[in-house]
Image (cartoon, rainbow, N blue to C red):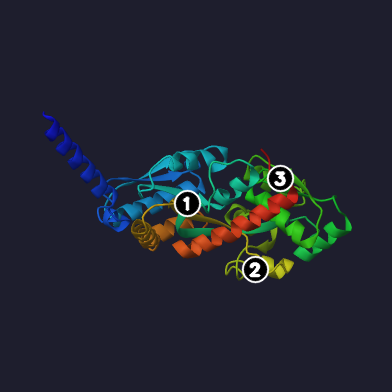
Amino acid sequence: MNLISIVRSAALTLATFFAVAMLSPSALAQTWPSRPIKLMVTFGPGSGTDIIARVIAEGLAEHLKVPVVVENREGAGGVVGVKVAMAQPADGYTLVAIANTFLIAPQLFKTMPYDPTRDFTPLARVASMPMALVVGAQSPFKTMKDLTDYIKANPGKTSFATSGKGAQSHLEIEYVKQQLGLNSVDIPYKNTGGAITDTMGGLVTFYMTVFPAVTPNLTSGKLRALAVGAPARLPGFPDIPTYIEATGIAEYVPTAWFGYAVLNGTPADIVAKLNEGIVAATNQPRVREKIQGVGASVSIAQSRELAAQMRTEADRWSNLVNALGMRTD
């Protein structure tokens, strides 16, 4: 090949490169999706996040006409899976299942590989579970006021179970303590079952966890709920007051929620298609039935609404963790 041919070939290659590079995100999105989509679940198989993600993946695959493959990458409170997702291109082919932990984990450490509101674009929230504060059936506390009055009169003499330092079950109680000026000792547990058992037995004074985890023991009369994280009383449990009613803390509705996100920089047209697809999937009767089957409620929030919720919650957790001096290396 002579010099002129080489120059012409190089020029053509460069022209092709710049033509592709200058395609608008909208033009790139026109061919999307053309291959399978990966849905990263940062917790193990069988978890609530995993079960909901798998049924959403089925509905989304039907809507988009391409496979949506769930991949479990658990570890370090969800951080392992998030790091794997961040190593992928921001092209809409990698989704991350997110929940409260996605916002909480970065607040607990001075150095983290991701910022939930800076590095990710939320797609949609699909479900939520109210958090309930419970005591054993033999507990002398019949109402939240009974409990808080006793704690104020006896600082440091009560205890509460948590699912570990920095878990939502821990931080929600710390928030209530901060707001009401309470002093109670946290007792971390390795699992929800142990925490529930010791609450029923009176070894700890109270426990705050997702409502489905305690529903059987509430129904059987082994536990008593003093408050539930819902905007209004639950139809099936009308005698349980909301946290706003029970504590007087304005706009306090503690819930565990489930949603999805993509890397920031994903073309807006693709974000819109994913948002539309996830909402459409969630509205399928069999998907709604599966979500309700794990004790969650269908609770749809589209991209902008979820983004606003995440910013508000991230600020709340950051302020609380700073106030408690819990941020570590």
The three-letter code of the residue at mark 2 reads: Glu
Pointer 2: residues within 10 angstroms few (<14), some, or many (20+)?
few
Please state the horizontal and vertical placement of residue 129, each as a whole percent of the image.
56, 58
Depth check, front residue: 17 or 160? 17
Q: Quadrant of residue 315?
A: bottom right
Q: Do we see residue 200 in this rendering?
A: no
The three-letter code of the residue at mark 1 reads: Phe
Report how far apart the C-alphas of labels 2 and 3 lie in the structure: 25 Å
Residue receiving disc 1? 120
Badge 3 marks a residue whose secondary structure is loop
The three-letter code of the residue at mark 3 reads: Met
Q: Residue at x 23, y 42 (%)?
A: 14
Q: Is 47 drawn above or below residue 131 in the view shown?
A: above
Dot 1 or dot 2, earlier in sequence: 1
Badge 2 marks a residue whose secondary structure is loop
Residue receiving disc 3? 326
Please state the horizontal and vertical placement of residue 252, each as a whole percent of the image.
65, 65
Report how far apart the C-alphas of labels 1 and 3 lie in the structure: 24 Å
Please state the horizontal and vertical placement of residue 311, each as a whole percent of the image.
56, 59
Q: How many marks?
A: 3
Q: Residue at x 79, y 65 (%)?
A: 145
